[in-house]
Image (cartoon, grey):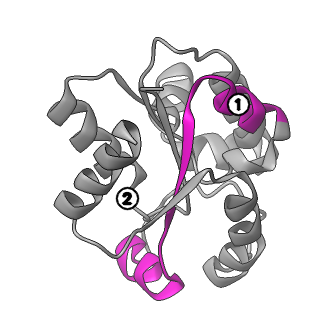
Amino acid sequence: MFNISFIGMPGCGKSTLGNAISKELNLSFVDTDLLIEKKFEMTLEDVKNKFGYQFVRSSEEEVILSLDASTQIISTGGSAIYSDLSMKHLKSFSKIIYINTSLETIIERIDLGQERGLAVPDGVSISDVYSERKPLYERFAQNTIDGSLPVDALLKLTQEMLNG
């Protein structure tokens, strides 16, 4: 199978790695967050502020369900794992790889002030989100890679998974 769906927390490197693999192997790439932003012509943060976090999650499910095997590399939004339907759909045509990244690294990367459009209720901390989502990422992952590694190392690991 030559299709991969990356799951993990915001800031774990899904888009960075997805882009790198698609360029390296000349594969099609899609970032579901960007598809949502394009659909509504606004940032995820604005979509969340205008319609609520549940709307962002349902929009993500809709976007994921519209994808098929023609998209070879998929970077999902951090909340994709809240939809069993989305995960089952992705698993039907792609290998699901969890980019496991420590909470400290996530916080460092997303810089708490950054507007990320996290699909969570207002006032919920990154730490709470991490604790809630980690078991879900682990449940759906078919493979797990260490998000603290440099991109070139992750690229190599992912290629090995594809070939293995």
Indicate yes or no whether the magenta region holds residue 60.
no
Q: Mark 2 points at which residue?
A: 13
- Segment colored magenta: 85-112
Q: Residue 131 got which mark?
A: none
Q: Quadrant of residue 12?
A: bottom left
Q: Which residue is drawn at 46% across and 28% down?
A: 3
Q: Residue at x 68, y 45 (%)?
A: 80
Q: Residue at x 46, y 88 (%)?
A: 104
Q: Which of 136 and 109 is in front in this view?
A: 136
Indicate yes or no whether the magenta region holds residue 91.
yes
Quarter occupied by the C terminus: top left
Q: On screen, 19 above or below 158?
A: above
Q: Which of marks 2 and 1 is nearer the N terminus?
A: 2
Q: How crowded is mark 1: few (under 14 residues within 10 Å), some or many (20 or more)?
A: some
Q: Mark 1 points at which residue?
A: 59
Q: How far across and how far down the image is residue 101, in percent?
A: 47, 74
